[in-house]
Amino acid sequence: MAATDDLIPLFPMHAVLFPGAALPLHVFEERYRLLVRERRDFGVLLIREGWEVGPGNGENTFDIGTLATFEEVDPLPGGRFFVLVRGCRRFRLHSLSHDKPYLQGEVEWLEDPPKSARPRLLHLLRRYLEAYGVELSGDLAARKGTRAVWLAGSLLQVETAKRQELLECGDPMIAEQLVSDELIKLDGVGQLEPVRPLKVSPN
């Protein structure tokens, strides 16, 4: 059963983080600089509307997000940080707490949907990556079921609303449809340039 009533720091932003995915961040706002100094794992939540920066902002979020853990922390001039975090597991936000300079939230940990091998999703992911000239390291076939869904969400360059939907449901069929739709678009574009590195979220 899922654990409940855990209090974790929250980092609302205009990005969706999937379990297993990496996310680079430029941290300059004081409340989040404190969070980095404390090295606390934190929850990434997609903002529905509004801005990330400033007191009182970033509280209008979706309820389902992903816990992030620090992998790299590089200090920058002026007390700023460049950090690399990785998604761990999903949660549902139940309430907010303002006891710290940064937001915290009472969360319920969500179980991954049941794993099921879907060869079609793996095949579509291979085609999608090949369209960008990307070769996979390791065996994609080992990423069965849920992990392949999270991989699809991490790789697809689609609207954040669609990525959020996939994070919330974890449905391989929806992942297949998203990848298939993107392949149809790419077929219409023709030869593509290699995938560009992800932009660093200005937080």
Image (tube, rainbow, N blue to C red):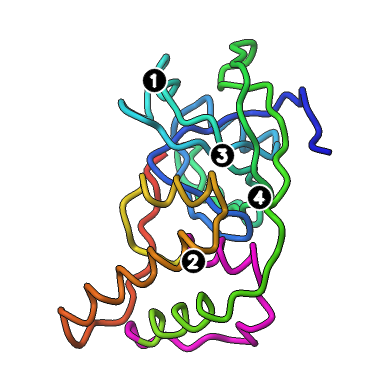
**Of labels 4 and 3, the one closer to you:** 3
Element on which disc 1 rests: loop
Magenta stretch, residue numbers: 131-154
Of the two numbered discs 1 and 4 on the same chain, state the one appearing first in sequence: 1
Residue denoted by label 2: 152
| 151 is higher (above) or lower (below) than 18 | below
Nearest to the eye among marks 1 and 4: give it: 1
- Between the C-alphas of marks 2 and 4, the distance is 22 Å
Label 4 element class: strand
Check if mark 1's residue and mark 2's residue have beta carbons within 8 Å: no
State yes or no: discs 1 and 3 in contact (Cβ < 8 Å): no
The kind of residue on which mark 3 rests is Gly
Residue 57 is labelled as: 1
- Name the residue carrying label 4: 70
Alpha-carbon distance for marks 3 and 2?
Answer: 16 Å
> Marks 4 and 3, Cα distance to the nearest angstrom?
16 Å
Left or right: where does residue 89 sit relative to residue 190?
Answer: right
Q: Residue sitting at 56 percent across and 61 percent down?
A: 150
129 to the left or right of 122: left
Magenta stretch encompasses residue 19: no
